[in-house]
Amino acid sequence: HMIQRLLTIVAKHCLSGSGFSKIALKPGHPLREFFSRGGDTLKNYLVLDDVVLMGAIYEMASSEDREISEIAKRLMDRRLYKTLDLSFVGSDEGTQKLRARRIDNMKFRKYHFKDESAKNRIYSEIGGDEDRMHKRLHVLDGDVPTEISRLSKIIDSLAPQRTFTRYYFESESDRDKAMSK
């Protein structure tokens, strides 16, 4: 979410055409090219990879835009946003909605955001793809090794994704404040 927020701000500066100096990326940088008007071509997209992004984050730490530089520095220093899942108040949907309304009406010192479609699976097949078949949890069904979720209704019932609400806070104190109200 931090990288998403960072790239959203960078894109806005690039699309405005006047904000290039604020993002601290040199002319011709792949991110600048991609986010420029008409720049979102397949060629520009294929140039983007982890190395380009990490290098850009290092450069953006010296950005004139305070929010860009702050997020970039936090990513570099691994000072990640603090999360709060509404499941901490229990599984009752009404209780969670009440807590969400309280949090949404609170004032925080720093920017925070809400993801109402976070997903989690309690159990899934270990190493679900064929390349990791050796890591799956197998039990014997007669003489045949079988993945455990195919034999146990309990484990199979844990497999569906559960959607929940998650908040992201820039500071631990803001997250703690949201938990205490």
Image (tube, rainbow, N blue to C red):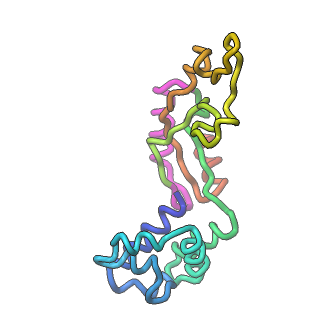
Q: Position of residue 74 (x, y in %)?
A: 64, 68
Where 65 sits versus 26, above or below?
above
Residue 105: in magenta span: yes
The residue that appears at 67% across and 13% down in the rendered structure is: 141
Say if residue 70 shows up in the picture.
no
Most extreme residue toward the left is 38
Q: Residue at x 61, y 34 (%)?
A: 88
Seen as rendered, the residue at the extreme top is: 142
Seen in the picture, residue 80 relative to 43 is either above or below; the reply is above
Q: Nearer the viewer, residue 30 or 103?
A: 30
The residue that appears at 49% across and 88% down in the rendered structure is: 26
Viewer-nearest residue: 19 or 150: 150
The x, y position of residue 123, in whole percent, is 61, 29
Q: Is residue 56 magenta?
A: no
Q: Nearer the viewer, residue 37 or 106?
A: 37
Residue 63: x, y in percent? Answer: 54, 82
Residue at the far front in the pictured view: 143
- Residue 142 visible in the current orientation: yes
In the figure, residue 59 lies in which quadrant? bottom right
Q: Could you say which is closer to the camera, residue 88 or residue 13?
A: 13
Residue span colored magenta:
91-112
How many marks the image carries: the answer is 0
Can you tell which quarter of the image residue 120 is in? Answer: top right
Vertical placement of residue 89 versus 73, above or below = above
Q: Position of residue 107 (x, y in %)?
A: 50, 54
Using residue 173 as the reference point, say whether residue 161 is left or right of it.
left
Residue 33, placed above or below residue 103? below
Quadrant of the drawing holding the C terminus: top right
Residue at screen point 61% across, 53% down: 174
